[in-house]
Image (cartoon, rainbow, N blue to C red):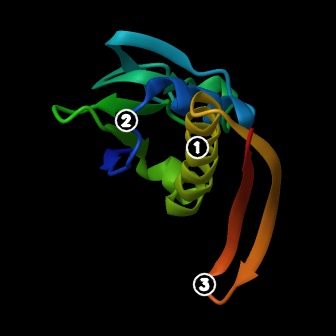
Amino acid sequence: MSKYLEMRTTFTDEKYLVEALQDLGYQPEVDRDGSRLVGYMGDERAERAQVIVRRRQLDSASNDIGFARDASGTFQAVISEYDRGIGFNDTWLGRLAQIYKEKQTMAIARAKGYVFKGREVINTAQGKKVQLRFAVR
């Protein structure tokens, strides 16, 4: 049985987390009270989460991946050691965080009346950076 580990994130808004997971091709399950995660053998685990990517959407030997809201309102990623080893690791969470931040930024800009003008990926010394462009109406 693979041990679950909690990984810190900066996700606080369930809507953008769900949308970001959907952009990556998953159909996350949402349960505001939290549901138990299921291990690779179909066994219910003690860990609970409010946003869950069920294992059937992952590798055949995967466990569920969950996002559990902590006392501060931030979602913590609950990912098994096995799943971290097959690619659901810091890099995957970074890609998810990038999409989350873009969704959040777009919504805030629209609410403030800005018009989206484009998205550009720029290569920097630190790696690729996404730049969103907006204009005032």
Q: Residues within 10 Å of mark 2 (few under 14, many from 20)?
A: some
x and y, in percent, of residue 20 in the image: 63, 36
In the picture as drawn, the residue positioned furthest to the bottom comes out as 125
Say whether marks 3 and 1 touch (CB < 8 Å).
no
Mark 1: which secondary structure? helix
Circle 1 packing at 10 Å, graded few (<14), some (14-19), many (20+), is: few
Q: Which residue is mark 1?
A: 105
Q: How far is the residue under mark 3 from the one under mark 1?
A: 21 Å
Residue at (53%, 48%) from the top-left corner?
Answer: 83
Closest to the observer, 132 or 72: 132
Q: Measured along the vertical axis of the image, is residue 37 above or below residue 24?
A: above
Q: As shown in the figure, which amino acid type bears the numbered disc 3?
A: Gln
Answer with mark 2 or mark 3, whichever residue precedes in sequence: 2
Residue 77 as seen in the image, left or right of residue 17: left
Residue 2 visible somewhere in the drawing: yes
| Horizontal and vertical percent position of residue 43 | 41, 19
Residue at image point 62% right, 55% down = 95
Q: Mark yes or no: residue 1 visible.
A: no
Q: Which mark is residue 126?
A: 3
Res. 12 mark: 2
Mark 3 is surrounded, within 10 Å at the Cα level, by few (under 14), some (14 to 19) or many (20 or more) other residues, namely: few
Q: Return the disc, 1 or 2, that comes first in the chain's sequence.
A: 2
Q: Which mark is residue 3?
A: none
Query: How many labels were placed on the picture?
Result: 3
Placement of the C terminus among the 4 image quadrants = top right
Q: Give residue 26's quadrant in the image.
A: top right
* Dot 3: element: loop
- Which amino acid type corresponds to the residue marked 1 in the rendered image? Thr
> How far apart are labels 2 and 3 at the CA level?
26 Å
With respect to residue 92, does 109 lie above or below?
above
Q: Quadrant of the N terminus?
A: top left
